[in-house]
Image (tube, rainbow, N blue to C red):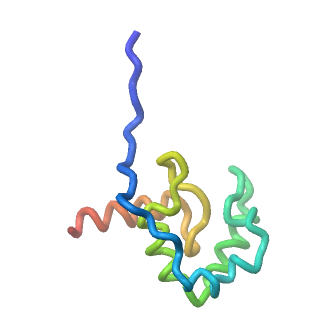
Amino acid sequence: MTRRRAARRPAPAALAVPGRWAERALCAQADPDAWFPNKGQRALAAIATRICGHCPVRAQCLDYALSGADTWGGIATGIWAGTTPPERDRLRQRKVVAA
């Protein structure tokens, strides 16, 4: 029996710690569980997304997430800049195609 390995994303070369922008992030003032809802917790995810929509550092957060900060063991997790993992995967794919 052969084992199939799941495709892994390459790890970012050097992931920087978030900048001072993170101090102004609205999520820093709210329940962190909202940004990492379990499957089926759509209401909780909607709250996080709504808060992100008003965040003054949303663009910096998205850039940081797309740099690889949103991954845990190679899998994208959580709500970052109001986007879900599948949405960020699509943004990454567009970025690769455009390059």
Q: Is residue 67 left or right of residue 37?
A: left
**Count of residue discs:** 0
Asked if residue 78 is positioned above or below residue 72 in the image, the reply reads: below
Q: Is residue 91 left or right of residue 27?
A: left
Asked if residue 55 is positioned above or below residue 1 in the image, the reply reads: below
User: Which residue appears at 56% of the width and 75% of the height?
Assistant: 81
User: Which residue appears at 43% of the width and 67% of the height?
Assistant: 66
The residue sitting at the bottom extreme is 56
The residue sitting at the right extreme is 31
Residue 36: x, y in percent? 68, 59
Residue 55, by quadrant, is bottom right
Most foreground residue, 79 or 65: 65
Residue 86: x, y in percent? 49, 57
Residue 80: x, y in percent? 57, 69
User: Which residue appears at 54% of the width and 69% of the height?
Assistant: 83
Asked if residue 10 is positioned above or below residue 24 in the image, the reply reads: above
Asked if residue 99 is positioned above or below residue 22 in the image, the reply reads: above
The residue sitting at the left extreme is 99
Most foreground residue, 60 or 97: 60
Residue 27, by quadrant, is bottom right
Quarter of the rendering occupied by the N terminus: top left
Q: Is residue 64 left or right of residue 11?
A: right
Residue 19: x, y in percent? 52, 80
User: Which residue appears at 64% of the width and 73% of the height?
Assistant: 49
Quarter of the rendering occupied by the C terminus: bottom left
